[in-house]
Image (tube, helix red, strand yellow):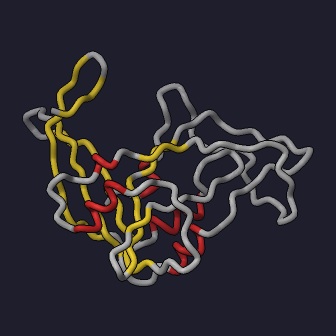
């Protein structure tokens, strides 16, 4: 199973992690705005052969939507991808839709956390990293799909406890799709 944290990507010359991202006091004052340094994976990461209407909606809804106070999800969805090479040396990209249901209360609680802010007159060392987040959504009983906004740490990455809540869900594979990958001078491309 591909975990949410596994989608964190350390760029070739970048380091992973965020030093000094401890919990901040409740009455802290932001001395500067931090922009998210994570990127949302493209909706094309959801397999084209997925027949679930929620996946079709997931491909079209805007990411980073704040959760409405009255939104009550009954399932979480994510589209993940990984590369595999068979014995003949053929490399394929495997896209997978995963679904998790049951008790989502801990996840919802974590998604409603505020962003951490830098405390006035303190130094925070943040590593230069990028983070790619899988296509992730929540579905309510009416079939409404939201791609929620993730609370950020002081360094602009998704808070670890939010990632842990996503990873803790009982994910089950729903649909898998595969595309052949060829290598060229600019890197990996799908064909």
Horizontal and vertical percent for residue 49? 14, 56
The quarter of the image holding the C terminus is: top left
> Quick check: 75 above or below 129?
below
- Placement of 170 over or under 164, stated as above or below: below
Q: Nearer the viewer, residue 151 or 125?
A: 151
Q: Closer to the camera, 33 or 167?
A: 33
Image location (x, y in percent) of residue 106: 54, 77
Kindly give the residue lying farthest to the top in the view shown.
185
Q: Is residue 8 left or right of residue 60?
A: right
From what the image shows, is residue 100 above or below residue 15? Answer: below
* Total labels drawn: 0
Q: Quadrant of the N terminus?
A: bottom left
- At x 51% / y 69%, what residue is drawn? 165
Name the residue: 23% across, 19% down: 184
Q: Kindly give the residue lying farthest to the left in the view shown.
A: 88
- The one of 8 and 75 positioned closer to us in this rendering: 75
* Residue at the image position 10 percent from the left and 38 percent from the top: 87
Identify the residue shown where x is 58% and y is 53%.
158
Q: Position of residue 129 (x, y in %)?
A: 57, 36
Q: Position of residue 44 (x, y in %)?
A: 28, 46
| Rendering quarter of residue 2 | bottom left
User: Image quadrant of residue 99?
Assistant: bottom left
């Amino acid at each position: 199973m591909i975990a949410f944290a596994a989608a964190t990507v350390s760029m070739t010359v970048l380091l992973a992690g965020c030093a000094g991202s401890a919990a901040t006091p409740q009455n802290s004052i932001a001395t500067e705005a931090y922009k998210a340094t994570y990127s949302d994976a493209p909706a094309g990461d959801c397999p084209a052969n997925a027949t679930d209407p929620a996946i079709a909606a997931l491909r079209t809804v805007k990411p980073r939507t704040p959760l409405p106070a009255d939104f009550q999800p009954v399932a979480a969805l994510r589209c993940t991808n990984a590369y595999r090479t068979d014995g003949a040396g053929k490399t394929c990209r495997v896209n997978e839709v995963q679904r998790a249901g049951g008790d989502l209360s801990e996840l919802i609680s974590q998604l409603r956390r505020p962003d951490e802010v830098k405390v006035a007159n303190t130094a925070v060392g943040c590593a230069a990293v990028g983070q790619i987040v899988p296509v992730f959504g929540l579905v309510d009983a009416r079939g409404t799909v939201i791609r929620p906004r993730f609370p950020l740490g002081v360094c602009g990455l998704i808070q670890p406890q939010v990632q842990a809540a996503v990873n803790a869900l009982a994910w089950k594979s729903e649909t898998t799709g595969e595309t052949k990958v060829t290598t060229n001078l600019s890197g990996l491309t799908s064909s």
